Amino acid sequence: MVPLGPEIHDLKSVHYALAAAERLHAAIIILRLADSHTVRAPWIEEAMTDLVASARLAGLRLTIVEAEGKAEREVVELAEDERIDLLVFGEDQKQLEQQVLQLAPRLGHLIIQVREKDTMSLQTEEGRSRWPS
């Protein structure tokens, strides 16, 4: 399951979940969390529509659930009701992840947070390049 609140800035968590579902032959639930105070960027909506269409064309089982209650409660209830095996949060959802864990610490072993990859840098020493240790 991938919870998507209005605070998201990218769809890396959805991409990660789609890739994992394809490898594992699993179904995906995207939980779209509404917030009356925040509106999602239009490009996110367009990208989401394209991702969903591509996933379905690839034969992935994908369900979108809309929720308007308290985000952390909606995540916990759906995770329990659907017996979710994995929760995928984006890097910009740290607060939601913490709130979910406060409400249901038992879900901690099911959570993956998709983060930006660290960039490697080369250091030079006496004209030679070497990887930092």
Image (cartoon, rainbow, N blue to C red):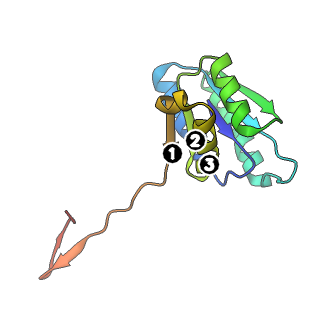
Q: Indicate the secondary structure of the residue bearing disc 3.
A: helix
Q: Do the CB atoms of the residues marked 2 and 1 lie less than 8 Å apart?
A: yes
**Residue at the spot x=43%, y=54% of the render?**
117
Which residue in the protein does label 2 denote?
89
Look at the numbered disc 1 and give the secondary structure of its residue.
strand
Q: Are marks 3 and 1 in contact (CB under 8 Å)?
A: no
Image check: 68 left or right of 112? right
User: Where residue 15 appears, x then y in whole percent?
Assistant: 56, 40
Residue 95 horizontal/vertical position (percent): 62, 49
Left or right position of 113 against 72: left
Mark 1: give few (<14), some (14-19) or many (20+) Cα within 10 Å. some
Which badge, 3 or 1, is on the more N-terminal residue?
Answer: 3
- Above or below, 120 against 92 in this view is below
Q: Is residue 34 above or below residue 132?
A: above
Q: What residue is rendered at 51% in x and 34% in y?
A: 111
List the residue tagged with mark 3. 93
Three-letter amino acid code of the residue under disc 3 = Gln
Percent position of residue 6, x then y: 75, 49
Q: Residue at x 81, y 41 (%)?
A: 34
Proximity of marks 2 and 3: CB atoms separated by less than 8 Å: yes
- Residue neighbourhood size for the residue with mark 3, other residues' Cα within 10 Å, grouped as few (<14), some (14–19), many (≥20): many
Dot 2 crowding, Cα within 10 Å, few <14, some 14–19, many 20+ = many
Q: CA distance from mark 2 to mark 3?
A: 6 Å
State the image coordinates of residue 51 (x, y, percent, origin top left).
66, 38
Task: Name the kind of residue labelled 2 in the image.
Answer: Phe
The alpha-carbon separation of the residues under discs 3 and 1 comes to 10 Å
Where is 80 relative to 128, above or below? Answer: above
Quadrant for the N terminus, please. top right
Q: CA distance from mark 2 to mark 1?
A: 6 Å
Amino acid residing under circle 1: Val
What residue does disc 1 label?
114
Q: Nearer the viewer, residue 63 or 4?
A: 4
